[in-house]
Amino acid sequence: MSSSFRDLRVWHEAMQLTAEVYKGTIGFPRHELYGLSSQMRRAAVSVPSNIAEGKGHRSDKEFSHFLFHARGSLLELETQLLIAEELQYLFREDAQRLLAKCEAVGRALSGLINSLNGKRPDKEEPTTNGERPTTDICLNAWTKSKRVTKS
């Protein structure tokens, strides 16, 4: 039985992030309506959209490809949040809260990508400082909460 993109925890987290970005950009200056505000909203919408689109493809390889697109959009959003904070369009606390949500979604995306590509935490080598990559933590949490069934 095939699961839906709606069954993925990372999709739900990305949807919540998108809603919060929309709420956060409401107070931006009017002259940013078609500028930074619009770019942030498009990047945020792209994250859950790419997760959903990728889930609709036939192979894990294709799904993984779309998850990388989602991660790229997420990094774009993080950059835009930093710009909005620098321009004082967002309060520091609000920007930091949204950035923390971006990081959480990013860890979940990395964990899902690693699981689709057959990488397990016990197979990954420690980093140069002897620590395990952060995707280990995310992958363990992800596999305990939801497992994607192969389409």
Image (cartoon, rainbow, N blue to C red):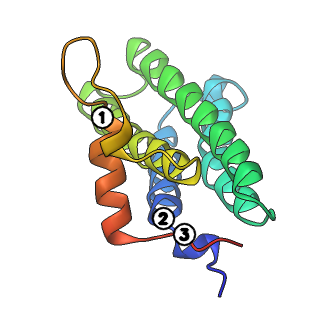
Query: Disc number at residue 103?
Result: none
> Disc 3 versus disc 2: distance between alpha carbons?
14 Å
Type of residue at label 3?
Val
Helix or strand or loop: what does disc 2 sit on?
helix
Q: Can residue 98 be seen in this view?
A: no
Helix or strand or loop: what does disc 3 sit on?
loop
Q: On the image, numbered disc 1 is attached to which residue?
A: 134
Can you give x and y, in whole percent of width and height, for residue 98 in the image?
36, 39
> How many residues crowd around disc 1 within 10 Å: few (fewer than 14), some, or many (20 or more)?
few
Closest to the observer: 26 or 53? 53
Q: On the image, numbered disc 3 is attached to which residue?
A: 148
Disc 3 to disc 1: CB gap under 8 Å = no
Can you give x and y, in whole percent of width and height, for residue 61 in the image?
73, 49
Type of residue at label 1?
Thr
Residue at the image position 58 percent from the left and 37 percent from the top: 71
Can you give x and y, in whole percent of width and height, for residue 49 in the image?
69, 55
Q: Can residue 31 be seen in this view?
A: yes
Q: Which of marks 3 and 2 is nearer the N terminus?
A: 2
Q: Earlier in the sequence, mark 3 or mark 1?
A: 1
Disc 1 to disc 2: CB gap under 8 Å = no
Q: Which of marks 1 and 2 is nearer the N terminus?
A: 2
